[in-house]
Structure formats: C-alpha cells, structure tokens
Image (cartoon, rainbow, N blue to C red):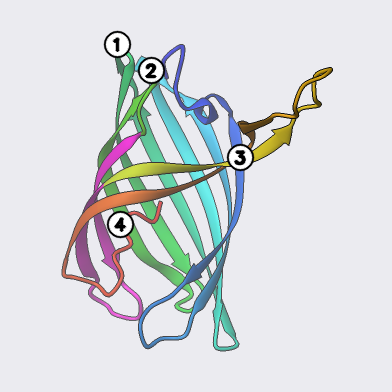
Amino acid sequence: MTLLDLDDAKSRPLVLESGYRLITAPNTPNENRLQEAATFRFPLFAQILLSDRNRFDLDWKNGSSTWRYRNKLTPERTFAIRSYHFIPYVAAEPFYESQYSKWSNHRSLCGILIRGRETRPIQSLLSVRERHGQKAKPAESLCGSCSLPLLFSAKMIRGQLNPPAKGGLRTKHIGEQVGTVTDSCASNVAFSHPAPQVCQCDEQ
C-alpha cells in the first residue's frame, strides 16, 4: 500500500459490511439476499496487502431460505505512477452452501484496478468458477468483465428573496445550492462461457 492510497479503507485492519440485495430474473420469483461481511487486512512483505473477507449470505424466496459462507483471500500490490494507482490482484474464494451441506463452489480471480485522483476507478477482471452442487464432476465457467462506475449528480436549486434595500425593490437570486443528490452506476463490458442466465463475475 502506498503512502497516500486513494482507497482509505485499505489502511483499516477491519472493515464491516452489511447490505441487502434483490435478485430478479425473467419468469422466476424474486430472490432476497441479506449480506454480512467482515474483511481483515494484513500488510505483508514487498508492499503486498492481503485481504481476508468472510461473508455470510442469507437467501430466501418462495417461503424457503438457504445460507452460504464465502471466504475470499486477495493479495494485491499498488504501483503508483504520477497521479494514478495500478493495483493488480489475484483471489481465491471457496463457497459453503447449506443446501448441499458442503463446500460446493470455488472461484478464482485475477484482475487489475486503476484509480486516479481526478477520475473514476476502472476495473478489469477474469473469473473462473467451479460449481459442484450435487454433481461429482464440477461444472466450470469462465467470465470476464471491464467496469467503469459513472457518477450522476442533481443539484437542488431554490430561489431566495433578498430583503429590499432602503427605497429599492426586492430582488430574487436563483442558483443557491442547498443540497446535492448523487447516484452511481457501472458501465460493464462482460463475457462468459458457457453463457449463464445471469453473469456473476462482478459479484464481488
């Protein structure tokens, strides 16, 4: 990790996350997912940073629920060139799923994250996933993506009436910023083989 890293979360030894996700697909019931995660970070030799993410997912749909545990290990190193940070990384993540009562999935990733002080981060990754499920022989899938988060902002503008000057008229000034609403999305270019119904290579 560099002295002035653009991602301040990497300087924290422990990061806790909590979230909810609604998964939709054509002609299938909606799936609800509660996500809880704890990430530990350990600085290693040669400026390599090791992240150990422990994530618990609780899924429910049609009145039934399942859970899974995911343990993702990610070594990475930051290379700073002027105002840009290039962060190559590799990762391995096994999955334990309650519906199979075993370690039924494994995902391997490699990629690079590019950050700039004045630009949005760009991420490119390649993912190989083995799905065992109830089968003796795992089904493999290859997935790749390149994502660029886009930021939108809408400024709420209000008019303010200034008190009239002595002997003058009341004037109205438009353009005072009283708040900013921001939203973001990601522009993705992705491929997968074989093509699944939903490509989950960007499901970090």
Give the class, few, some or many, for how many residues have Cα within 10 Å of label 1's Cα (few <14, many ≥20).
Answer: few
Report the number of numbered marks. Answer: 4
Q: Residue at x 48, y 75 (%)?
A: 101
The amino acid beneath tag 2 is: Gln
Q: Left or right? Give the position of 145 relative to 93.
A: left
The amino acid beneath tag 3 is: Ile
Task: Compare residues 20 and 89 and report the one nearer the observer.
Answer: 20
Magenta stretch, main secondary structure class: strand
Q: Nearer the viewer, mark 3 or mark 4?
A: 3
User: Mark 1 — residue?
Assistant: 82
Q: Nearer the viewer, mark 3 or mark 2?
A: 3
Counting residues from the N terminus, which is met first, the one under dot 3 or under dot 2?
2
Give the class, few, some or many, for how many residues have Cα within 10 Å of label 3's Cα (few <14, many ≥20).
Answer: few
Counting residues from the N terminus, which is met first, the one under dot 3 or under dot 4?
3
User: Mark 2 — residue?
Assistant: 47
Magenta part of the chain: 121-146
The amino acid beneath tag 1 is: Arg
